[in-house]
């Protein structure tokens, strides 16, 4: 048995991990879109590194687009097997992939209207017809269900606490009568999340694929989210009379923002200004989350006893049409605009940043992880000039960030997620979904916690997996 890492290898996005059995059965864990990788992004998304027609099954950890966003291209390129995910992931993936196809076609059309001499026409990676065919291949597997994919391959999902429907993937694969237990963490949420339950414990694994986005960071001991939002909104909208532009992922982050703003209203502190969610996708995702109250943690359930709409408050309006979105940029009045995408590399928020970045009275508020090469990553890094739609813009608006709003666990959360494992029984732990320097720091921390065989795979690198390893055997260890 082999495993190859065709995405999220020494970077955060583009999740794709391919397991190949002796009988050539292939199981792909996630098929995500690369995001925010600068000029190489398109090339990375064009090339899988494997033959889509040869993939037998796909297991999807959750619906974020960097985990599911290339599924329709995989299908368009010849994949015709079963896709396994939770029902909530199916609900979200449907709207996210449809929206991705729409955004790609819109962005390609916009770019093609502004082509410069010698530049090639842009094309979308897939169409809505490809998304429809992809959805027809989905098979629902619920949390903790012991599901037989085929003889000698069993699957179980446990709640990863990251977003609605997110799961850690647990495979038991038997070859030559010997079982190998493989766990893929997906993205691990936070213990004490604003909205969701904490990640579940899971059975002992032989091999673990572990996300490491915040493997060298701690989110705690930061100011409360409500207090930080209140300070930023008051300073920008009431003092400077400007706008707060918040790039936010449509699933998870937008709902957390709305919940926090609703909390300010319940306390009588919410500034009396307009609040816009300019993302039809965010509106749909919010409704889906309302339809799955079983995922809420106890704190949210307490709020629901006195407030039936935890994502609604005075002054909030969901923007649907493109014309309404454009009108926001012509309206000089102070307001808060929450819009996708979270890395500010696509969607309506990119236009809002373009139209507001040059005015010092405005604030661009980042509320989650951004790949360093993405527009959001460049803004967080303090770049004074950024490129938006092929033109350069001077950054005069104030750039702020709330690090504690990440839906990814910090290194203490990641270690707690692994605390149910006996490190001596884990034959190999692969670090994925993280920047290389961060992964190196986390690998050292893991070694201190007893995980001796820690590998940080390179892009397209493959490793052999065996049912049993003697001491010292295994894939290369990369720890510094």
Image: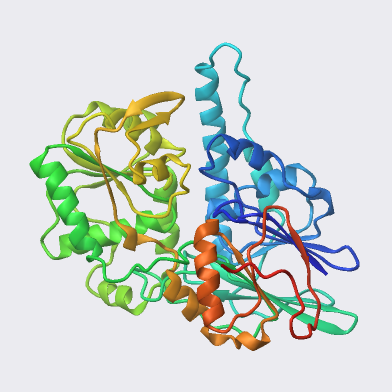
In this view, the residue in front, 256 or 412, is 412
User: How many numbered marks does the figure carry?
Assistant: 0
130 left or right of 63 in image: right
The residue located at (25%, 62%) in the rendering is 225
- Evaluate whether residue 474 shows in this view: yes
Q: Where is residue 397 in the image (x, y as percent from the top left)?
A: 24, 36
421 left or right of 301 in image: right
Q: Position of residue 226 (x, y in %)?
A: 21, 62
Tell me which corner region of the image, top left, top right, bottom left or bottom right, holds residue 156.
bottom right
Q: Residue furthest left?
A: 239
Q: In which quarter of the image is the C terminus?
A: bottom right
The residue located at (52%, 84%) in the rendering is 419
- Evaluate whether residue 165 shows in this view: no
Tell me which corner region of the image, top left, top right, bottom left or bottom right, holds residue 261.
bottom left
Q: Is residue 313 above or below residue 463?
A: above
Q: Is residue 137 above or below residue 446?
A: above
The residue located at (80%, 66%) in the rendering is 2
Q: Where is residue 475 in the image (x, y as percent from the top left)?
A: 74, 70
Tell me which corner region of the image, top left, top right, bottom left or bottom right, holds residue 338.
top left
297 left or right of 446 in image: left
Give the colour scheme shown.
rainbow
In this view, the residue in front, 353 or 260, is 353
In this view, the residue in front, 320 or 252, is 252
480 left or right of 239 in image: right
Q: In this view, does 93 lie above or below 378?
A: below
């Amino acid at each position: 048995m082999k495993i190859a890492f065709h995405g999220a290898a020494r970077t955060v996005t583009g999740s794709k991990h391919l397991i190949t059995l002796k009988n050539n059965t292939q199981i792909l864990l996630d098929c995500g879109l690369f995001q925010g990788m600068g000029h190489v992004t398109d090339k990375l998304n064009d090339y899988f590194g494997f033959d889509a027609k040869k993939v037998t099954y796909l297991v999807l950890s959750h619906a974020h687009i960097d985990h599911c966003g290339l599924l329709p291209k995989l299908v368009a390129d010849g994949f015709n097997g079963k896709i396994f995910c939770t029902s909530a992931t199916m609900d979200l993936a449907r709207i996210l992939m449809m929206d991705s196809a729409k955004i790609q076609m819109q962005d390609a059309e916009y770019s093609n209207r502004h082509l410069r001499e010698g530049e090639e026409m842009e094309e979308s990676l897939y169409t809505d017809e490809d998304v429809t065919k992809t959805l027809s291949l989905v098979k629902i597997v619920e949390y903790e269900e012991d599901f037989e994919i085929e003889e000698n391959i069993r699957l179980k999902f446990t709640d990863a606490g990251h977003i609605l429907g997110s799961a850690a993937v647990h495979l038991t694969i038997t070859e030559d009568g010997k079982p190998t237990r493989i766990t893929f963490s997906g993205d691990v949420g936070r213990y004490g999340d604003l909205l969701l339950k904490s990640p579940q414990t899971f059975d002992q694994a032989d091999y673990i694929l572990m996300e490491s986005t915040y493997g060298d960071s701690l989110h705690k001991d930061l100011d409360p989210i409500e207090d930080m939002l209140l300070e930023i909104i008051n300073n920008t909208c009431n003092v400077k009379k400007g706008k707060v532009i918040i790039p936010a992922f449509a699933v998870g982050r937008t709902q957390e923002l709305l919940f926090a703003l609703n909390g300010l209203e319940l306390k009588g502190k919410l500034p009396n200004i307009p609040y816009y969610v300019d993302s039809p996708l965010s509106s749909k995702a919010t409704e889906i989350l309302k339809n799955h109250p079983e995922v809420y943690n106890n704190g949210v359930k307490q709020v629901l006893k006195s407030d039936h709409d935890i994502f609604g408050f005075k002054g909030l309006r969901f923007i649907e049409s493109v014309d309404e979105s454009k009108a926001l940029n012509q309206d000089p009045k102070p307001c808060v605009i929450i819009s996708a995408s979270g890395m500010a590399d696509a969607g309506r928020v990119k236009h809002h940043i373009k139209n507001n970045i040059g005015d010092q009275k405005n604030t661009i508020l980042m509320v989650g992880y951004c790949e360093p090469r993405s527009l959001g990553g460049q803004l967080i890094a303090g770049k004074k000039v950024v490129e938006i739609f092929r033109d350069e813009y001077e950054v005069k608006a104030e750039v702020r960030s709330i690090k504690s709003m990440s839906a990814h666990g910090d290194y203490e959360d990641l270690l707690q997620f692994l605390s149910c494992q006996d490190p001596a029984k884990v034959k190999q732990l692969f670090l994925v979904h993280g920047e290389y320097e961060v992964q190196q720091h986390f690998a050292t921390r893991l070694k201190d916690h007893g995980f001796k065989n820690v590998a940080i795979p390179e892009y397209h690198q493959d490793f052999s997996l065996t049912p049993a390893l003697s001491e010292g055997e295994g894939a290369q260890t990369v720890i510094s």
